[in-house]
Image (cartoon, rainbow, N blue to C red):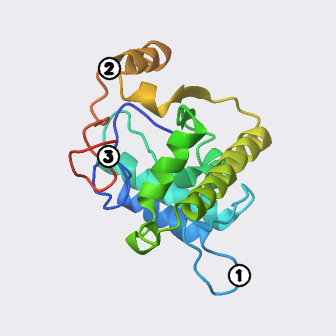
Amino acid sequence: MFVGSDSPDLDSPSGNQEDALARLVHNRLMGRNGLGKICNWDNPRYVLGSNPDAVQHIKAYINFRIRNHTGSWGLKDPRLSFLIEPWHMATQAMPVYWIHIYRENKDAMVRSLIAMLPAKLRYCKDDQGLYRLAANWAETYVLAIELGFARIGIQPYQLTYEELLTLEGQARLSKQFKFQVPIRCIRPDLNRKGDRTFC
């Protein structure tokens, strides 16, 4: 994922500190399969860097953010796992930091994904089935990340999501990228719905 010193806003209704405009662009690009169907981000399509439509949409998003936000800014969105190539193509002439933020262990990632599933699935009383679904989902994102960075030939800076929520982890980022600590956009007191419970 690409993150900078500050995120544009906290306007995502379903993702912790995910920019709604970026989510809209990413969902549109990932959902184009040539069959007139929309694939949501839980059934995504890997987007190649040679896709001119994807690169054009990402550049339009970047230009919007540059016009409306001074200084450094960043973007957190798990959908970027499937859009690494077009993002790389769209930002080749820009000073970009690629930072891969990942959960500390697989179980934490799977539990996080289960929390994002629609309520009608969470209340189906099939806990093992939900875990398998989320585990397969998580594996898909991991494979997409490995493929994307291998194809663009970049080794991103890495830290865990749990580290990112601590001042020590933010200090690591500050030392590496000259960010100010604490990083204002990181809000460990928000969950995926914006309530003050867990992250």
Pointer 3 local density, CA inside 10 Å: few below 14, some 14–19, many at least 20: some
Asked whether the beta carbons under mark 2 and mark 3 sit within 8 Å of each other, the answer is: no
Pointer 1 local density, CA inside 10 Å: few below 14, some 14–19, many at least 20: few
Residue 47 seen anywhere in this rendered image of the structure? yes
Q: Is residue 170 left or right of residue 47?
A: left
| Image quadrant where one finds the N terminus | top right
Say which residue label 2 marks.
180
Q: Sequence order check: which comes first, mark 2 or mark 3?
A: 3
- Tag 3's secondary structure? loop
Residue 1 seen anywhere in this rendered image of the structure? no
Say which residue label 1 marks.
34
- Tag 1's secondary structure? loop
Q: In x, y percent, where is residue 18?
A: 38, 51
* 3 shown above or below 130: above
- Tag 2's secondary structure? loop
The amino acid at mark 2 is Gln
The amino acid at mark 3 is Pro
In the picture, the disc for residue 77 is none
Q: In x, y percent, where is residue 92?
A: 63, 40
Pointer 2 local density, CA inside 10 Å: few below 14, some 14–19, many at least 20: some
Q: Is residue 71 left or right of residue 22?
A: left
Say which residue label 3 marks.
8
Q: Quadrant of residue 131?
A: bottom right
